Image (cartoon, helix red, strand yellow):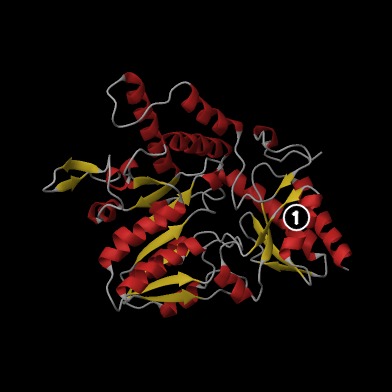
Amino acid sequence: MATASPLDRVADFPAIPDGWAYLDTAATAQKPQAVIDAITRAYDTSYATVHRGVYQRSADMTVAYEKAREAAARFIGAGSANEIVFTRGATEGINLVAQCWAATQLKAGDRIMLSMLEHHSNIVPWQMVAERLGVAIDVLPLTADHRIDLDAMERMLTPAHKLVSLGHVSNVLGSVLDGRRAADLAHGVGAKILLDGCQAVPRIAVDVKALDCDFYVFSGHKLYGPTGIGVLWARPELLDAMPPYQGGGSMIDRVSFEKTTYAPPPGRFEAGTPHIVGALGLHAAIDYVSAIGLDAIHAHEAALVAQAREGLSAINSVRLLGPEDSAGIVSFAVEGVHPHDIGTILDESRVAIRAGHHCAQPLMEALGLPATARASFGVYNGPDDVAALVDGVRRVTRIFG
């Protein structure tokens, strides 16, 4: 039986049975009972559409939906709930900015700056825009300890750069970006900056005003919330100037066959019936994480990372990746063993990790690896889970001798 987390949160997660070490939180977090209950209540006793009905239940659901937007705004330090656009996830948020801001603001000869460690979701949308407009993409290298090299960013930036888009916390390496310095550098040449916060918001306190970024995205399901819901935050003046992402119901002011006018943000970017219950589940997840405290979560995960790195580093054939102070994520390779085999053998020991390229193939190429094994932690993990991981990797090395 696994020892309870120091945060004493294991019992909150009904999908985690005794003795199962779930170490794949960076892919998707398990859901606490509070989130499950919020979703169940929404479907079971209070479900109705939003923004349309004149009957009481619809009005009540609309209030609940908009309170979720207010909660998301508070959670990341936004100035107003109207700066929050609900999306299907961070991927859609990045695509929205690519199509509604970059595709309308950039021109041939402009440049976009990314980094070597980005998730495919923070590469491909920019490539699509760049190919269409004749925009160039520059890629920041990593430091020796696998962080985005901001000194290189300072050297590489030019007035031709109009957008910088970087991961706040790497989904593979757990390295934390100095977001404020990156924003200052970008703004120094007149560029806008987007931060991908998928791995940051479950682990560290985020304040978009303190970061001074222009766009920020995250997904609900990595924050202990449901899938299919996410958040795009943007400066209000940028949202005001952006055209709609999709056409349909809810995003309009008035429709005629002669001309359609659009609703102000955020409604302009939320065409169709939204993921109502997803938003309520996200609100419950935000409340859950906020009640624990992100400082406590970060300290807890830092202790687990330190334990994992110490244990794995004692195994001669293990290569650890990422910085010592990675945020909740430890990626590694075992000499002579494919990560898929590592994952399979660990699964036999009831340890669930991720094995593969983690939607970061350019990073794998830079690391000289086809794939890595990745353990990622959450509030439900404790020291026994890390011990099971290390014991399992020792078993891997014995099997492959």
Name the amino acid type tagged 1. Gln
Task: Point out residue 167 in the picture as x, y percentages from the top left corner.
Answer: 49, 62
The residue located at (55%, 28%) in the rendering is 37
To which quarter of the image does residue 126 belong? Answer: bottom left
In depth, the one of 171 and 356 nearer the eye is 356
Taking the view exactly as shown, the residue that stands out farthest to the front is 257
Q: Which of the image's four quarters has the N terminus?
A: top right
To which quarter of the image does residue 69 belong? Answer: top left
Residue 174 to residue 277: above or below: below
The residue located at (63%, 74%) in the rendering is 367
Task: Point out residue 97 in the picture as x, y percentages from the top left corner.
Answer: 35, 58
User: Quick one: label 1, few (<14), some, or many (20+) residues within 10 Å?
Assistant: some
Task: Point out residue 312 in the picture as x, y percentages from the top left corner.
Answer: 78, 62
Task: Point out residue 381 in the picture as x, y percentages from the top left corner.
Answer: 70, 44
Q: Residue under label 1, please give it.
A: 307
The residue located at (58%, 63%) in the rendering is 175
In the drawing, does residue 261 fall left or right of residue 43? left
Q: Which of the image's four quarters has the C terminus?
A: bottom right
The residue located at (60%, 49%) in the rendering is 298
In the drawing, does residue 74 fall left or right of residue 369? left
The answer to whether residue 152 shows anywhere in this view is yes
Residue 59 to residue 30: above or below: above
Taking the view exactly as shown, the residue that stands out farthest to the left is 258
The answer to whether residue 216 shows anywhere in this view is no
Q: Secondary structure at mark 1?
A: helix
In the drawing, does residue 90 fall left or right of residue 2? left
